[in-house]
Image (tube, rainbow, N blue to C red):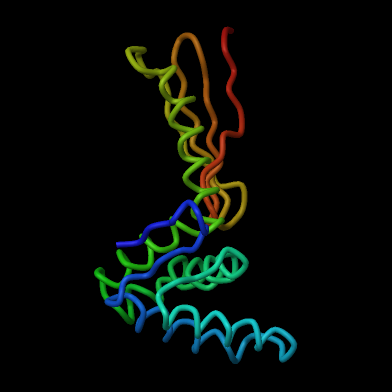
């Protein structure tokens, strides 16, 4: 569906997703200061061609991220639109950073494979910031869950 071509770094958007992405770019336009509208219009033109250059991918990630996190994508474009936007988002700088974060968390969680889980707790630090703490006889891990992703907050090994 979406690929990044190594030699150019462009993000390619399949024809079936372009119209939806263009609608999001247009919806975002009124909230952007006038001095930034030209770059948003340029993003729209590149989405129409299906090829977003590296310098506009962060803006695309920002727009898709807001739409996905707010639930707007699913409300307006159903689960299929959400899937398309998620596939595209994963190719943006923000999506690649999220993938790196998740890979790091999964590597840390591998330490728990085969160990008995002795405690699991979910806490709220503040609205939108939650923690998940998992304990075993040999280690305790705390994950921070926020709207923009999951991070490893702490890993304590031993007693």
Left or right, 35 with respect to 44, comes to right
Quarter of the picture holding the C terminus: top right
Residue 1, x across and y down, in percent:
29, 62
In the rendered view, tell whether residue 100 sits above or below residue 61.
above
Which residue does the image show at 54% across and 55% down from the upper left?
A: 148
Vertical relation: 58 (above or below) 40? above
Pick the front one: 75 or 90: 90
Q: Residue furthest front?
A: 7
Which residue is nearer to you in this view: 44 or 112? 44
- Check the image and report above or below for 108 versus 96: above
- Identify the image quadrant of residue 85: bottom left
The quadrant where residue 24 appears: bottom left
Please count the marks in the image: 0
User: In terms of image quadrants, where is residue 39?
Assistant: bottom right
Write the residue at 40% across / 75% down.
50
Residue 66 at x, y percent in the picture: 51, 70
Give percent across and percent down for residue 69: 46, 65
Residue in the picture at 47% in, 40% down:
102
Q: Which one is nearer the viewer's eye here, 42 or 144? A: 42
Measured as percent of width and height from the top left, residue 38 is found at 66, 88
């Amino acid at each position: 569906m979406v690929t990044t071509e190594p030699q150019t770094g462009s993000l390619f958007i399949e024809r079936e997703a372009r119209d939806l992405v263009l609608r999001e770019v247009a919806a975002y336009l009124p909230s952007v200061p006038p001095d930034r509208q030209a770059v948003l219009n340029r993003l729209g033109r590149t989405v129409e061609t299906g090829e977003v250059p590296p310098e506009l991918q962060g803006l695309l990630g920002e727009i898709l991220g807001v739409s996905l996190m707010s639930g707007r994508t699913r409300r307006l474009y159903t689960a299929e639109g959400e899937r398309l936007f998620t596939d595209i988002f994963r190719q943006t700088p923000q999506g690649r950073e999220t993938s790196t974060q998740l890979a790091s968390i999964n590597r840390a969680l591998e330490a728990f494979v085969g160990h008995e889980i002795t405690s699991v707790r979910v806490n709220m630090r503040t609205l939108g910031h939650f923690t998940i703490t998992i304990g075993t006889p040999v280690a305790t891990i705390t994950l921070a869950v926020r709207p923009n992703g999951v991070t490893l907050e702490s890993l304590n090994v031993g007693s």
